[in-house]
Image: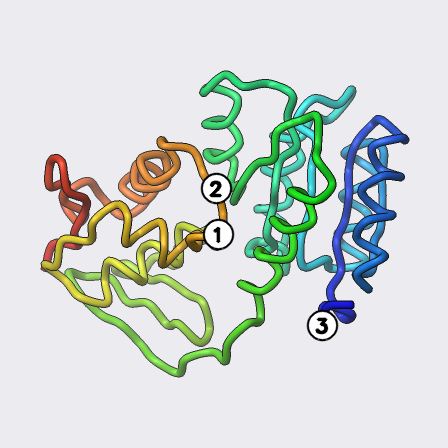
């Protein structure tokens, strides 16, 4: 059994057999599991249970996964909750829509239990895995408090999803340095987690929309840097 006994996962899918399969595999590893078959019930559970990770089907009747993700990101206390999408769709646009809504990763259906469990365990290790760093980073008009997880530009405080915050913190840790794409993947998503080729691009674009295009530079064929 793993050391994830205190961790909580919320599974959301309108197919009961998928919920049963995933719950069985997680509970065998000592992970507390809550389930919901629709977005509205899942939102209520998320607010009351405060899960470490939400595994969310994209295609659901009523409130779909992308809508629910948007709602989670607007809910105080749940802005940084890890969100992974389940999807049977392989088109880039469905993955991009999930990332743009604030999702952290996705898992393709049909779900392979071993792959699913490994990915969940890897993600859970990345939350609460280390002690918070009491540090403030300031550069080019932006102030990041890594302990309080806040970002301020001018007099405006920004709300950033977890991965956008981590990405900005990485780039701002060494203004002017070019971070190669491979390094960004390893630092933010981990070498043991598969993410699509467009993942970094989507997150960079969302960051630029919030902090301004001029603060993050692109070095063609290499990666990105925070402009000092």
The C terminus, quarter of image: bottom left
Whether residues under marks 3 and 1 lie with C-beta atoms below 8 angstroms apart, the answer is no
Q: Indicate how the structure is coloured in the image.
A: rainbow
Q: CA–CA distance between discs 2 and 3? A: 23 Å
* Front position in the image: 120 or 171: 120
Q: Are marks 1 and 2 in contact (CB under 8 Å)?
A: no
Residue at 26% x, 45% y: name it: 181
Tally of numbered discs: 3
> The residue tagged with tag 3: helix, strand or loop?
loop
Residue positioned most to the bottom: 134
The crowd level at tag 3 (other Cα within 10 Å; few <14, some 14-19, many 20+) is few
Mark 1 Cα within 10 Å, few/some/many (few <14, many 20+)?
Answer: few
Compare residues 185 and 56 and report the one nearer the observer. Answer: 185
Pointer 2 local density, CA inside 10 Å: few below 14, some 14–19, many at least 20: few
| x 76%, y 71%: residue | 6
Q: Which residue is mark 2?
A: 194
> Which badge, 3 or 1, comes first in the chain's sequence?
3
Q: Which residue is mark 1?
A: 192
The reply, left or right, for residue 144 in relation to residue 8 is: left
Q: Determine the CA span between mark 3 and mark 1.
A: 18 Å
Residue at image mark 3: 3
Where on the picture, by quarter, is residue 150?
bottom left
x then y, percent, for residue 84: 61, 42
Instruction: Answer above or below: position of 203 versus 134.
Output: above
Q: Position of residue 51 (x, y in %)?
A: 72, 57
Kindly identify the residue that appears in the image at 63 percent across and 60 percent down.
77
Horizontal and vertical percent for residue 158? 40, 54
Mark 3 or mark 2, which is nearer the start of the sequence? 3
Nearest to the observer: residue 56 or residue 221: 221
Q: Tell me what residue is drawn at x 52 percent, y 44 percent.
A: 104
């Amino acid at each position: 059994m793993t050391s994830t006994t205190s961790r909580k996962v919320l599974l959301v899918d309108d197919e009961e057999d998928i919920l049963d399969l995933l719950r069985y595999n997680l509970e065998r590893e000592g992970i507390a599991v809550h389930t919901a078959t629709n977005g509205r019930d899942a939102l209520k559970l998320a607010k009351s249970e405060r899960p470490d990770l939400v595994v969310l089907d994209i295609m659901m009747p009523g409130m779909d996964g992308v809508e629910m993700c948007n709602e989670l990101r607007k809910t105080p206390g749940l802005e940084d909750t890890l969100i992974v999408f389940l999807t049977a769709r392989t088109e880039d646009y469905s993955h991009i829509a999930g990332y743009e809504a604030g999702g952290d990763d996705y898992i393709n259906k049909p779900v392979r239990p071993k792959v699913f469990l490994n990915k969940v365990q890897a993600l859970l290790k990345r939350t609460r895995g280390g002690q918070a760093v009491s540090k403030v980073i300031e550069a080019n008009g932006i102030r990041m408090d890594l302990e309080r997880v806040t970002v301020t530009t001018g007099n405006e405080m920004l709300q950033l999803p977890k991965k956008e915050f981590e990405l900005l913190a990485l780039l701002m840790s060494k203004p002017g340095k070019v971070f190669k794409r491979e390094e960004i993947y390893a630092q933010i998503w981990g070498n043991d987690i598969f993410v699509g080729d467009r993942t970094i691009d989507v997150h960079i674009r969302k960051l630029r929309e919030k902090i301004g295009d001029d603060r993050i530079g692109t070095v063609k064929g290499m990666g990105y840097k925070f402009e000092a």
